[in-house]
Amino acid sequence: MANGFEISQFVGNLMSIWLQPQNILDIAIVAFVIYELLAVIRKTRAAQLAKGAIVVVAVYALAYILGLRTVMWVMNSVLQVGILALVVLFQPELRRALEQMGRTDKWASKLLRSRRMDPGLRAQWQNACLAICDAAEQLSDTNTGALIVLERNTNLSEIIRTGTPLNGDVNREMLGTIFYEGTPLHDGAVVVRDGMLKAAGCVLPLSDNLEIGKDMGTRHRAALGMSENSDAVVVVVSEETGIISLAKNGVLIRRLDRQNLFNLLQEELVPPEQQDTPKKSSFWRKKNEKGQR
């Protein structure tokens, strides 16, 4: 009877929890956070550190169950500084996770970004996209490596400060000169802001993604790292194969031709025309049509 009463009481408590919407929301948020945390850890070298932390907790639980006082005292001393130690050990992963949290998703980016782009800025970006595509095609034909970062919402001033300021127009000849082998700036990255060439020879953060193919070198790893730490779009030309790639949100799109690259850049950097000029209402459209008749 006691077991039956306890079971019924447990079921009743469980039902009362699920009948309250805030409890369901609470559990869903915690589950989502744990899932995302495990997903981030699984893709980085922090997975091994996480396994070590789990082993420490398991040893502490076993010592508590068996009543091993000396082991518990040692484990308590370790756990007192454990949080600080974890912060130090997981510092790169924690920084990356916070940066990803601070970045806006696609829907949020659309809400935060101005729906109307200045005509001058639109023209600069369109000219920059054309020049980048022309340069990428030319560099690909000659197997010349290139790395071009296109800034969007995330400010890249820290990256720009690592290079040489230029403040010039984006054109095929300039990009070809910068990335020509033997020039002082050919090993670094070029940063484009508001359709203008801001700096060259910039140093980018490298990606820790373990799934990157062995046929991709430091340029591709730097492009992925930049796209993981910001919302920038990065164009890469391989020095070994001449393959043109585009990195965005930690994903590398490879084997692009000039037209596909141009379409992707236009989609990411230049809002559609209908967002710049508000549509006329049907009332005014019909009135104009009648007036023309």
Image (tube, rainbow, N blue to C red):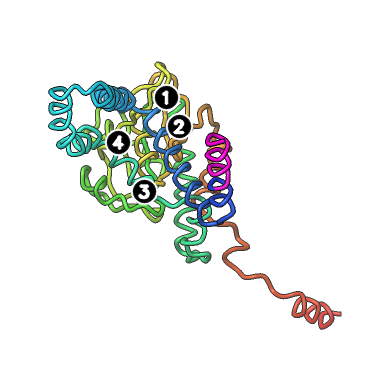
- Residue 269 magenta-drawn? no
**Tag shown at residue 93:** 4
CA separation, marks 4 and 2? 38 Å
For badge 4, the amino acid type reads Glu
CA separation, marks 3 and 2? 19 Å
**Tag shown at residue 40:** none
**Image vertical order of residue 291 relative to residue 43, above or below:** below
Residue 183 figure quarter: top left
- The reply to whether discs 3 and 1 touch (Cβ–Cβ < 8 Å) is no
Residue bearing mark 2: 138
CA separation, marks 3 and 1? 23 Å
CA separation, marks 1 and 4? 38 Å
* Residue ID at (25%, 26%): 64
Q: Label 4's element?
A: helix
- Residue 8 magenta-drawn? yes
CA separation, marks 2 and 1? 7 Å
**Image vertical order of residue 13 relative to residue 209, above or below:** below
The image position of residue 31, as x and y in percent, is: 47, 41
Residue bearing mark 1: 142
Residue 124 visible from this viewpoint: yes
- The reply to whether discs 1 and 4 touch (Cβ–Cβ < 8 Å) is no
Mark 4 packing: few (<14 Cα in 10 Å), some, or many (20+)?
some
The range drawn in magenta is 1-12
For badge 3, the amino acid type reads Val
